[in-house]
Image (spheres, rainbow, N blue to C red):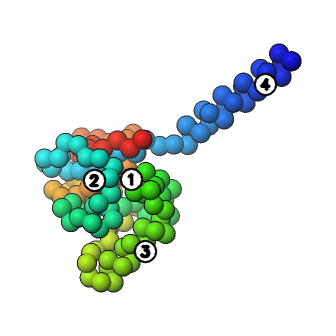
């Protein structure tokens, strides 16, 4: 019985650590000259869903799992819902979809070059060229 319980505990701890290993800590970044110091996930979603033009959003590629995770965390939307939102905005002339960058380095470069730029990357990719204003759970 003790041996069986030990195996169950080991399996449970492995499953718990495996679920955390796949989760990236995402952050929302802006230009270092931007006066914003903090932003909620709901506020960030406004820029990435075309509800506000105060910031210029930069996205990761459509097939990026990090992109899917980001939209789920900030807006509770999957990528097909996000595409539908942007298709309507672009078709009606009410918005321009965020530019897509290939990787974190390109996102950082685009945000660093634009005073109104906003993007998202894994926390481990942050450097002095950008400023973190939101940490997503």
Whichever of callouts 2 and 3 sits on the residue coming sooner in the sequence is: 2
Viewer can see residue 103: no
* Quadrant holding the N terminus: top right
Q: Residue at x 35, y 45 (%)?
A: 27
Q: Is residue 44 left or right of residue 2?
A: left
Query: Quick one: SS at disc 3?
Result: helix
Relative to 86, is 133 above or below? Answer: above
Q: CA distance from mark 3 to mark 1?
A: 17 Å
Q: Which residue, given by chain and number where applicable, does mark 1 sit on?
A: 74
- Quadrant placement of the C terminus: top left
Residue shown at 19% from the left, 42% from the top: 37
Q: Which residue is mark 2?
A: 43
Label 1 residue SS: helix
Cα–Cα span, label 3 and label 4: 47 Å
Position of residue 99 measured from the top left corner of the image (x, y, whole percent): 32, 67
The residue pinned by badge 3 equals 84
Rounded to the nearest angstrom, the CA distance separating label 2 from label 4 is 45 Å
Mark 4 lies on residue: 7
Determine whether the residue tagged by mark 4 lies in a helix, strand or loop.
helix
Q: Residues within 10 Å of mark 2 (few under 14, many from 20)?
A: some
Proximity of marks 3 and 1: CB atoms separated by less than 8 Å: no
**Who's the residue at 29% across and 54% down the image?**
44
Instruction: Compare marks 2 and 1 and give the one earlier in the sequence.
Output: 2
Residues at marks 2 and 1, CA–CA distance in whole angstroms: 8 Å
For the residues marked 1 and 4, what is the alpha-carbon distance in whole angstroms? 38 Å
Q: Is 104 displayed left or right of 29 in the figure?
A: right
Q: Classify mark 2: helix, strand or loop.
A: helix
Residue 106 seen in this snapshot: yes
Of discs 1 and 4, which sits in the foreground?
A: 1
Tell which circle, 3 or 4, labels the residue nearer the N-terminal end: 4
Task: Find residue 128 and report its horizontal and vertical position in percent.
Answer: 24, 40
Q: Is residue 76 above or below residue 2?
A: below
């Amino acid at each position: 019985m003790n041996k069986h319980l030990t195996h169950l505990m080991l399996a449970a701890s492995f499953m718990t650590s495996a679920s955390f290993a796949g989760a990236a800590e995402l952050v929302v970044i802006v230009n270092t000259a931007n006066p914003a110091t903090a932003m909620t996930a709901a506020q960030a979603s406004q820029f990435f869903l075309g509800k506000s033009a105060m910031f210029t959003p930069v996205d990761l590629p459509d097939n990026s799992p990090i992109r899917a995770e980001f939209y789920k965390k900030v807006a509770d939307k999957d990528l097909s819902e996000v595409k539908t939102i942007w298709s309507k905005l672009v078709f009606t002339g009410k918005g321009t979809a965020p530019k897509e960058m290939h990787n974190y380095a390109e996102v950082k470069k685009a945000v660093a070059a634009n005073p109104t730029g906003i993007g998202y990357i894994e926390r481990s990719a942050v450097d002095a060229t950008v400023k973190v204003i939101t940490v997503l759970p």
